[in-house]
Amino acid sequence: MQSSPAQSTPAAQTDRGLRFFHRLSFEETFFGWLFIVPAVLGLLFFRLGPVFASFYLSFTKYEIITAPRWIGFANYTKLLNDALWLRSIEVTLWYVSLFVPLSLTFAYTIALLMSRDVRGITSYRTLWYLPSVVPVVASATIWRWGLNPEFGPINYPLKVLGLPAPRWLTDPDWIVPSIVFIGLWGLGNSVLIFLASITSVPRTFYEAAEVDGANLWARFRHVTLPLTSSIIFYQLIVTVINSFQVFGVAYVLFVSNPSASSAGPDNAALFYVLYMFRNAFGYFRNGYASAMAWILFLVVMLLTIVLFYSQRRWVYYETEGGGS
Amino acid sequence: MTAYRIRHTASRFLIHLALAGGSAFMLIPFFWLLSSSLKAPHEIYVFPPKWIPDPVRWTNYREVFEVVAVARYTANTMIVTIFSTVGVIISSSMAAYSFARLRFKGRDIVFGLILSTVMLPYVVTMIPVYILFTRLGWIGTYLPLIVPDWFGGPITIFLLRQFFRTIPLELEDAARIDGASRPRIFAQIILPLARPALTVVLVLSLLYNWNDFLAPLIYLHKRDMFTLALGLNALQHFESGLDWTHYVMVLATLMVLPVIIVYFLAQRAFVEGIVLTGLKG
């Protein structure tokens, strides 16, 4: 995905062509750097700098009032004996393993259906996307009622039919599935991205496949799927990274203040970032929380790298004319 | 032929059924939110659910102003949203112009670095940035929510750069021959031509800041500084001894309504923004 900006797009070729005429001028260099000064400062002070700073802090004891004190790997070894931290990993992994496959397959399927140019497609698209613009606090508010086991509309049909109705947000076993459910309400974002990529597959490919006698499944399997695999791959990475960082919904639903000592019955909503947040902003254990942050960062990076390696086997890139 | 027709119509029907059913699922929560905001508290949690409030209590919308500082929260949210958005647009469009059009040594490396931080999990930067703002004495002010936006946003920069690259070079060259300086070309040629892309960025930034929960939660502690997101969260946890569910619903409606209006007005920009940021380059 981090494709080098100077691909051989037509624009880049003109760039190179132009170099024969104007050499790199002082004026261009001057304004070039001047215009990116804020962005470079932002990169240093709000992104790269903090990444290194939190790495350093993770080896210290630091509670804001006193200066950070170097304690080596103590934070990391302490984490391994922290039952709540282990609990937060359990909760988060459970969430990731449910949400990622469900949201990607759902979103892709819906996008496929929408791409069958049915009438009213624009209104469907509009409606499906709508929940994605709702603030996380509001959607937690809405679903606190929506998933109410007694009076909520989700359990309503189940109760009418006499089926077993889950206790959603009050049953420890159902809390993570509930958060997954709320997350799926905001599926529209991925649907739109998949839809754009599916509809951009050139019609001629399908026509050619049809001439070769490919049926609907074969056309999907050998045309749509490979030609959208790079977007599936990208969405996979983004969804994984975001799923590891669930925070808002769980906080609004289960936590009343930063140092609250529980997150749902049996800590079933103790997501990784929630526990990290509590340590950083509830207890001001900044070194300890930084160690947590770095472990999460490493895990996410490792996963991304693994996915990048695996993509060679299943992601298909067009050799020319992609991008920009 | 007829067999094909029947199958075709049947599959159409099923697709519509699935999409319409899904749309209903997406919409019902909004309907309920609105409906509960117009109910008496004891009518919200009843079985079976009452879909239409009876009587319709418009007074909820008046009373909520006495219970929570709605006007204050709205004003606060607007301050943060507006100043952040202005900042991110100015700083990012400048950088994007430079990355798209000016040639200088190190340009692609810097751009690559900025782009690579799109994927950076926010949790790794959260604590040091908080410490930085503590040192500056900015905790409890709006500065930590606004100032970072004045230093460019990676996605915004990327999105604008992609767009700037599609503006014909000839326009810029003609202006240069007429002796226009780079800042003038940027302000008078590039920016006006980039209005569609700027709209996308504007809308996405407004939405993001209006909805943001985490940053205000970290930095704002005094009630009269709260944004709507914080106010809505606090109201749900406030122990008044009375059932305030209807007020919670009113406040949520008031927070969501502007978002929905902007969404419907600027739908194209939304869709384009999602697709552009989602489809990478």
Image (cartoon, coloured by chain):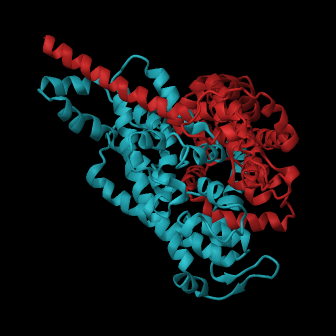
What colour denotes chain A? Answer: cyan
Total number of numbered labels? Answer: 0
Residue drawn 39% across and 46% down?
Answer: A104
Q: Is residue A298 above or below residue B15?
A: below
Chain in red colour: B
Residue drawn 39% across and 34% down?
Answer: A197
Direction top: furthest residue: B2
Q: Position of residue B233 (x, y in %)?
A: 72, 51
Q: Is residue B269 above or below residue B83?
A: above
Q: Position of residue A151 (x, y in %)?
A: 56, 44
| The one of B85 and A63 positioned closer to us in this rendering | A63
Residue drawn 63% across and 82% down?
Answer: A59
A306 displayed left or right of B182: left
Residue drawn 54% across and 80% down?
Answer: A83
B76 displayed left or right of B164: right
Specify whether residue B205 is in view.
no
| The one of A31 and A110 positioned closer to us in this rendering | A110
Q: Splitting the image into 4 quarters, where does residue B228 fall?
A: top right
A68 displayed left or right of A205: right
Q: Splitting the image into 4 quarters, where does residue A195 fall?
A: top left
Specify whether residue B185 is in view.
yes
Q: Position of residue B260 (x, y in %)?
A: 64, 30
The N terminus of chain B sits in image quarter: top left
